[in-house]
Image (spheres, rainbow, N blue to C red):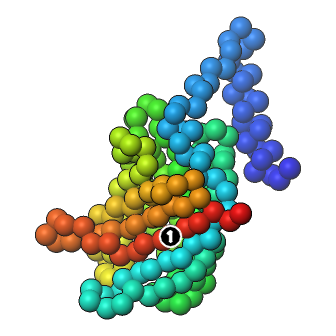
Amino acid sequence: MNAFAIAGLGTLVAGLAVLGTGDELKVRPPAKEHHWLQQLTGEWDTEVEAVVEPGQLPKQSKGTESIRPVGGYWVLSEIQGTCPIKNTPFTSFLTLGYDQDQAEFVGTWVDSMSSYLWKYEGTLDPARNALTLETEGPCPMAPEKHSRFREVIELKDKDHKVLTMSIQGADGGWVTMVTCNSRRRQ
């Protein structure tokens, strides 16, 4: 067990001691939204298309994604591949969960090409096939300017998912920048 795990365990034990002997730790069970996230777990092969400039052919690359559960509440995704725009190695980590108090999906993203911590809020469509995540952060074409982004994870079937990342233009419309087709490794 590493030092962080020991420290976390120590914090948990100290917190339980404060409760006293007559109190019970009450934990909410995972909701149906947490269960929805668990279907994303597994090993995936990904094909990426990124539009660098409107009217130009998209740049393509391949990668892998490993998604594992964190308890029954969260999933943690690690993506390895090549950035199609810069043609350099790329690593990212995505966390996704469901905040029962706010009644919305939440998440974070960090990657090997920036120092920005992306924070997501999202909703599931009524058919329960697509999770739409909204965020704001540095514009890839002008990093000093922040833009609104929308990412949609759509489940085509249990072994095929598509992620699209769009940026909001000055006119309020959305322009798709990145499309990732992922297929579960058998």
Q: Quadrant of residue 18?
A: top right
Q: Residue at x 49, y 85 (%)?
A: 60
Q: For the view shown, which residue lies furthest in the top direction?
A: 22
Judge by depth and name the residue closer to the eye, 170 or 49. Answer: 49
Q: Residue at x 41, y 81 (%)?
A: 50
**Residue 135 screen position, x and y as percent:** 36, 58
User: Does residue 135 appear in the picture of this structure?
Assistant: no
Q: Quadrant of residue 92?
A: bottom right
Q: For the view shown, which residue lies furthest in the left direction?
A: 171
SS at circle 1: strand
Q: Residue at x 39, y 48 (%)?
A: 122
The residue carrying mark 1 is 181
**Residue 121 screen position, x and y as percent:** 39, 49
Give the vertical position of 99 relative to 186 (above or below). Answer: above
Q: Residue at x 54, y 76 (%)?
A: 47
**Residue 154 screen position, x and y as percent:** 44, 57
Amino acid type, residue under disc 1 in the picture: Asn
Viewport quadrant of the C terminus: bottom right
Q: Quadrant of residue 77?
A: bottom right
Give the vertical position of 147 relative to 154 (above or below). Answer: below
User: Does residue 8 appear in the picture of this structure?
Assistant: yes
Judge by depth and name the residue closer to the eye, 51 or 78. Answer: 51
**Residue 180 screen position, x and y as percent:** 48, 71
How many residues crowd around disc 1 within 10 Å: few (fewer than 14), some, or many (20 or more)?
some
Residue 46 as seen in the image, left or right of residue 52? right
Residue 25 as seen in the image, left or right of residue 126? right
Give the vertical position of 137 relative to 105 (above or below). Answer: below
Give the vertical position of 46 relative to 51 (above or below). Answer: above
Residue 30 as seen in the image, left or right of residue 33? right
